[in-house]
Amino acid sequence: QVQLVESGGGLVQAGGSLRLSCAASGSIFSINHMAWYRQAPGKQREWVATITSSGMTNYADSVKGRFAISRDNAKNTVYLQMNSLKTEDTAVYYCTFVMNYGNYWGQGTQVTVSS
């Protein structure tokens, strides 16, 4: 079994920063890639960023240049540094670990950006 626990969400003013963390525990091996998604009220879940096992990153256009995804392999943790936050970034943020034997999701952490 694999468990993902996210942390770091909260309330921040527009222009501010937050750093999300997602720590995995359990049977962790053969990680393909890790990613962050988000879901705003009344909207579908959308992809935010991905980091592969080799460290390559990719971002949604809406966050490119403002967000940075990184990973600590020793800690089985993925991070999302969010800078220059906008009100439209308000959402529940979810991390996912995609492994050769399955995909696993965290429970989500709320990020609220006030104007």
Image (cartoon, rainbow, N blue to C red):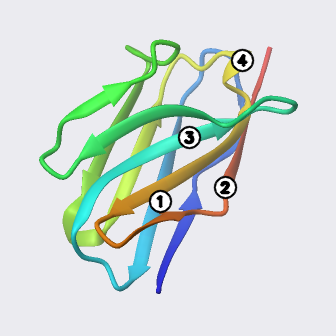
Q: Secondary structure at mark 4?
A: helix
Q: Which residue is mark 3?
A: 37
Residue drawn at x 26%, y 33% as measured from the top left: 57
Label 1 neighbourhood size at 10 Å, few (<14), some (14-19), many (20+)? Answer: many
> Which quadrant, please, contains the C terminus?
top right
Q: Quadrant of residue 77?
A: bottom left
Mark 1 → mark 2, Cα distance in angstroms:
9 Å
| Mark found first going from the N terminus, 4 or 2 | 4
**Identity of the amino acid at label 2?**
Gly
**Identity of the amino acid at label 1?**
Cys
Mark 1 → mark 4, Cα distance in angstroms:
22 Å
| Mark found first going from the N terminus, 4 or 3 | 3
| Mark found first going from the N terminus, 2 or 3 | 3
* Cβ–Cβ under 8 Å for marks 3 and 1: no
Question: With 5 as the anchor, is 54 left or right in this view?
Answer: left
| Mark found first going from the N terminus, 3 or 1 | 1
